[in-house]
Image (cartoon, rainbow, N blue to C red):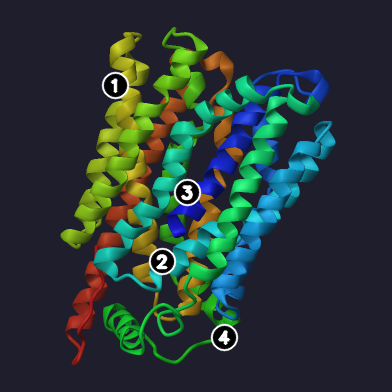
Amino acid sequence: MELKSGTAHHIENASVNDELVQKLGTIDRFGAHVKTDPKEIALVKKLDLYLCGQVPSNMILNRVRPSWYMASFMAMWSIVSVLTYLVHDYKTMLVARFFLGITEAPFYPGALYMISQFYTKKEVATRMSFFYTGNILASAFSGLIAAGIFAGLDGVRGLAGWRWLFIIQGAFSIAVSFGAFALLPDSPLKTRWLTAQERELAHSRMVLDTTAHREEGSGVWTGLREAVGDYRTWIFCLMDNLHLSANGFKNFLPTAVKTLGFSTTVTLVLTCPPYLVAGVASIVVSWSSGRFNERTWHITVSKAIAILGFALSVGTLNTAARYVGIVLFVGATYGVNNIILGWTASTLGQTNEKKAVAIALANTLGNLASVYTPYLWPDSGAPRFLTAMLASIAFSVGVVICAWIMRIVLKRTNKKLQEQENVVTVYVY
């Protein structure tokens, strides 16, 4: 159910971006003149309450039933998506996006927190990768889905194809939200479809797995203070921000692929394989990280491959070489995402309240990248997109540096912990 919910959410989100790409160039609907105008896209991101609502939402999540909370917001964003078909000018589009940001805010950090409540250090990154595959698959197929709807439903009942896009996807997400009410768990000790013995086991194994775990709960404000006051939180925030900055190609991949010289239809098809590779890489790298209980080298190697891909894409105009570069940097970049967030959850999980805030902070500050990275991808940068590619290389190097700093920090902390008596669990790096 988590995966289905994630897929529905990310297809909707990707389609909003596809819709911007399709329609920002027309005057009659949204009033803009340049397709994929980075200023327009950055403005929409700034208006999204998706960013600023994540930390408060995760604080609330510890005081309500997560299953009802998450499913309710999913239903609400789905309704907003359906109503987006009523948009008739640029102002109403911004209003719709504003409310979409409010209702989407709880989903991603909340889902990550819920996953981290049930899975240990060795398991959490792989489970997050299963969940995140919904995002990757949406990126792979949203353009094709949109193209099919535009071709088949444009003009039906007097509605443009893009309006049908929001109606259909919103209706699908509403249906999924009803299932989420019944199937999403609340916590290891409050999961309806587990037996009493299974609930106790689910809880106790997480207690044993958490380094410096404190059984007693703390208030949500205490959790906020603890997360903000732990300098490791900010290292993870910077790491995630640099990672998502290197991931800034997401909204512009069709534009980059189109510079290879193919038709629009072929370009849409060629955007799929990189994301399919990314889906496989995300799961395999996360599984390997859990299997060997290692984080730093998995991030380092993945980013090295991504850097090679960026370098290939900017260093030559050979079509085959550039496409291989695109496949490399897309696949390798997505392989890192779940490791960073899983590492954040397992390192800063001394209390549920602290962990919830730390995950939301890392994701919020990480996603600030979506505000400024569009400026790195102006149409004038084609075909090499030199500034964007070189910046992505620099961002990737920054991620590796942060990972090695965290490795040194946790290695020293582990040494101190091992000098104490009765210490069973140490930090993973």
Residue 96 lies in quadrant: top right
Q: Would you say the residues marked 4 and 3 are in contact, meaning their CB atoms lie under 8 Å apart? A: no
Seen in the picture, residue 130 relative to 359 is either above or below; the reply is above
Seen in the picture, residue 405 relative to 324 is either above or below; the reply is below
Secondary structure type for disc 2: helix
Residue 325 lies in quadrant: top left
Tell me which label, 4 or 1, sits earlier in the chain: 4
- Observer-side mark, 3 or 1, equals 1
- Residue that sits furthest to the front in the current view: 157
Q: Mark 3 points at which residue?
A: 241
How far separated are the C-alphas under marks 2 and 1? Answer: 34 Å
Q: Position of residue 86 (x, y in %)?
A: 81, 38
Seen in the picture, residue 37 relative to 124 is either above or below; the reply is above
Q: Would you say the residues marked 3 and 2 are in contact, meaning their CB atoms lie under 8 Å apart? A: no
Name the residue type under label 3: Asn
- Observer-side mark, 2 or 4, equals 2
Secondary structure type for disc 4: loop
Q: How many marks?
A: 4
- Observer-side mark, 2 or 1, equals 2
How far separated are the C-alphas under marks 3 and 2? Answer: 21 Å
Name the residue type under label 4: Gly
Q: Mark 2 points at which residue?
A: 115
Tell me which label, 4 or 3, sits earlier in the chain: 4
